[in-house]
């Protein structure tokens, strides 16, 4: 039974964000900094003095707008139907938009004054601003004349359209018929989440119906999805070419400061997981045969959740987290304790609250790094807690380091390229801790190992298949090749075989074909940021770091990494861990960890 958790103890305390001032005071201050920019946009380069004041104002603006954004959006996510916060958010976005238009020529002004700014930056005092301006100046080749930029803003207002169409169809317009359980009782389905839940059921009939209904729902719209995706990639490629890039992927590589070879090298390294992948699939099937007492294991049997650990109280969860993170030493644990003591976390589900979990972004100027989650007393919820704490403690360390430097630009950010590393590292440490804790209970132990390996392959092999598919399709469309549902599915199956060695596509019954519609409903494909392979980076590097964290040298490097924020390029940031993504070692070592766990599964 869940404890009476309706206590303030498990709610976050957002008030300290405002530092005893009212929200309207902060909004007025924010407007002043924006007004300052408008007044000084053409003169800030006149002298070293005006330049310094300009930079100072940018920093204030950043801090103030982060205070406002975090205060308002966290309140909003706590109750998404509370009009007070919805209206406030709209008002703020109108103010932001108004000034954005007034400051539309800022990048042009920076580029026009490149020589002068570089002279100023040579001054030791401004050393830390160099990366910030280098990132602006490298855009030079891709910036359009001002009039064209204005037109661009209007035309590209619809560029999110494909994403919106995708989300509307896949999340709200799509509907699911009721399904039956083994007694013949009909169950109403409200959202895809219901089906995912029923796919874990102990009732085989219910699992099967949920599995088929889920995949069929997307399968029937494959034509609409593929047309939307075709136009999305066509559009993204054309926009990229208009700015002087070879293609959409070329533009993303530029933004991420990487090149194609790194992507291919990651693909190749993950392809080498094929042998352990196949081995694991066989063992998992064998274990499920024994546990479920079924000989002919079907896809919907492998989603069954036969063991649920669901009686963990929040206070216990906190203790588990603190024990699991002991290898990160007191310096790290102190921050986690602070998060608990200062109520950074909104733990409990409630009406209107966002149903996912997050740790806040835009943290420069803040000293509390809030987390929203929906704790449900399960082991998964403990995992979510430790994952989000990974993000918050990361923010804490770069916030502390980057704020220390007086005249520095605050690189208080984590690029998606490496942002998941601390969270995966924490999750892995929790897994290692639980393995020890349940060492004598082979059922729980095997269950935890399978959950861990499933998650590992979901983030590596599966995401790399998706990524390779996205890369190939986007490039094909850029090279004026045709793209249809048939060609998209054929490529997907070819890549599954390439990365997993599995070749089970020829089952006669059409229901087995439904699952391949998955490739058309990957939301990141519609957001144009070549995202999904970054999951694999987070997983592989996070696991590698966790495995070696007891090594003093690695621990030292890890804190350096946590403190660096976005002060270096993504690849340089990862190098602080002593890791190069093109180096084979990290893949071999992670493969060995998984291999050893597979061996464990084979034991009695
Ligand atoms: Zn995360």
Image (cartoon, helix red, strand yellow):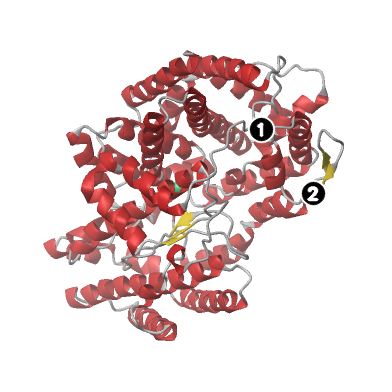
The alpha-carbon separation of the residues under discs 1 and 2 comes to 33 Å
Residue 484 x %, y %:
73, 34
Q: Is residue 447 left or right of residue 484?
A: left
Q: In this view of the protein, can residue 530 be seen by the observer?
A: no
* Residue sitting farthest toward the right: 184
Which residue does the image show at 80% across and 27% down from the upper left? 511
Between 472 and 336, the residue placed more toward the observer is: 336
Between 78 and 321, the residue placed more toward the observer is: 321
Q: Which mark is residue 453?
A: none
Q: Quadrant of residue 197?
A: top right
Which residue does the image show at 62% across and 49% down from the upper left? 235
On screen, residue 249 above or below 413: above
Is disc 1 placed on a helix, strand or loop?
A: loop
Residue 561 x %, y %:
26, 45
Residue 74 x %, y %:
49, 67
Is disc 2 placed on a helix, strand or loop?
A: loop
Q: Which mark is residue 175?
A: 2
Beta carbon of the mark 2 residue lies under 8 A of ligand 1: no
Q: In this view of the protein, can residue 161 be seen by the observer?
A: yes
Q: Quadrant of residue 263?
A: top left
Between 503 and 329, the residue placed more toward the observer is: 329
* Sequence-first disc among 1 and 2: 2
* Residue sitting farthest toward the left: 124
On screen, residue 316 above or below 448: below
**Residue that badge 1 annotates:** 481
Residue 505 x %, y %:
71, 19
Which residue does the image show at 43% across and 65% down from the upper left? 9
């Amino acid at each position: 039974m869940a404890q009476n958790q309706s206590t303030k103890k498990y709610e976050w305390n957002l008030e300290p964000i405002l530092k005893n001032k009212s929200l309207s005071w902060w909004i007025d201050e924010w407007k002043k900094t924006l007004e300052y920019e408008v007044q000084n946009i053409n003169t800030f380069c006149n002298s070293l003095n005006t330049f310094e004041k300009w930079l100072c104002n940018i920093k204030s603006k950043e801090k103030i707008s982060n205070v406002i954004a975090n205060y308002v959006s966290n309140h909003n996510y706590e109750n998404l139907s509370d009009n007070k916060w919805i209206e406030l958010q709209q008002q703020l976005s109108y103010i932001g938009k108004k000034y954005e238009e007034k400051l539309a020529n800022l990048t042009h002004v920076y580029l026009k004054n490149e020589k002068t700014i570089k002279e100023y930056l040579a001054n030791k005092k401004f050393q830390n601003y160099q990366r910030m301006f280098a990132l602006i100046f490298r855009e030079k080749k891709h910036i359009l004349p001002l009039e064209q930029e204005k037109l661009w803003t209007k035309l590209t207002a619809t560029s999110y359209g494909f994403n919106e169409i995708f989300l509307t169809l896949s999340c709200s317009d799509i509907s699911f018929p009721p399904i039956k359980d083994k007694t013949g009782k009909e169950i109403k389905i409200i959202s895809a989440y219901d089906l995912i839940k029923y796919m874990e059921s102990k009732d085989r009939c219910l699992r099967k119906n949920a599995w088929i209904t889920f995949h069929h729902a997307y399968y029937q719209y494959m034509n609409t999805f593929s047309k939307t995706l075709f136009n999305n990639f066509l559009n993204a490629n054309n926009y990229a070419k208009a700015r002087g890039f070879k293609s959409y992927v070329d533009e993303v590589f530029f933004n991420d400061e990487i090149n194609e070879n790194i992507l291919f090298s990651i693909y190749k390294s993950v392809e080498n997981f094929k042998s352990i992948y196949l081995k694991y699939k066989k063992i998992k099937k064998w274990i499920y045969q024994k546990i479920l007492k079924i000989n002919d294991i079907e896809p919907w049997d492998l989603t069954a959740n036969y063991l649920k650990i669901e009686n963990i109280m929040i206070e216990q969860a906190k203790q588990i987290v603190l024990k699991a993170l002991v290898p990160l030493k007191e310096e790290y644990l102190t921050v986690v304790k602070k998060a608990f003591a200062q109520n950074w976390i909104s733990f409990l589900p409630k009406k209107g609250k966002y149903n996912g979990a997050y740790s806040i972004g835009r943290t420069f100027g803040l000293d509390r790094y809030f987390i929203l989650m929906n704790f449900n007393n399960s082991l998964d919820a403990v995992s979510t807690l430790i994952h989000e704490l990974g993000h918050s403690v990361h923010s804490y360390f770069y916030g502390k380091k980057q704020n220390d430097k007086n005249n520095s630009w605050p690189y208080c950010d984590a690029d998606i390229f490496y942002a998941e590393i601390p969270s995966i590292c924490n999750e892995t440490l929790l897994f290692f801790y639980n393995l020890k804790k349940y060492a004598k209970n082979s059922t729980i132990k095997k269950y935890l190992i399978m959950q861990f390996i499933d998650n590992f392959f979901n983030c590596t092999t599966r995401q790399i298949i998706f990524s390779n598919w996205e890369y190939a399709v986007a490039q094909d469309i850029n090279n004026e090749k045709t793209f249809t549902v048939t060609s998209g599915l054929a490529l997907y199956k070819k890549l599954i075989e390439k990365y997993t060695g599995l070749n089970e596509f020829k089952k006669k019954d059409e229901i087995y074909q439904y699952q391949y519609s998955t490739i058309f409903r990957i939301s990141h494909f519609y957001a144009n940021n070549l995202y999904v392979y970054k999951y694999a980076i987070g997983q592989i590097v996070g696991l590698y770091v966790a495995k070696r964290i007891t090594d003093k040298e690695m621990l030292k490097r890890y804190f350096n990494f946590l403190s660096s924020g976005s002060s270096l390029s993504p690849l340089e940031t990862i190098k602080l861990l002593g890791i190069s993504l093109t180096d084979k070692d990290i893949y071999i070592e992670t493969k060995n960890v998984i291999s050893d766990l597979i061996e464990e599964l084979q034991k009695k």
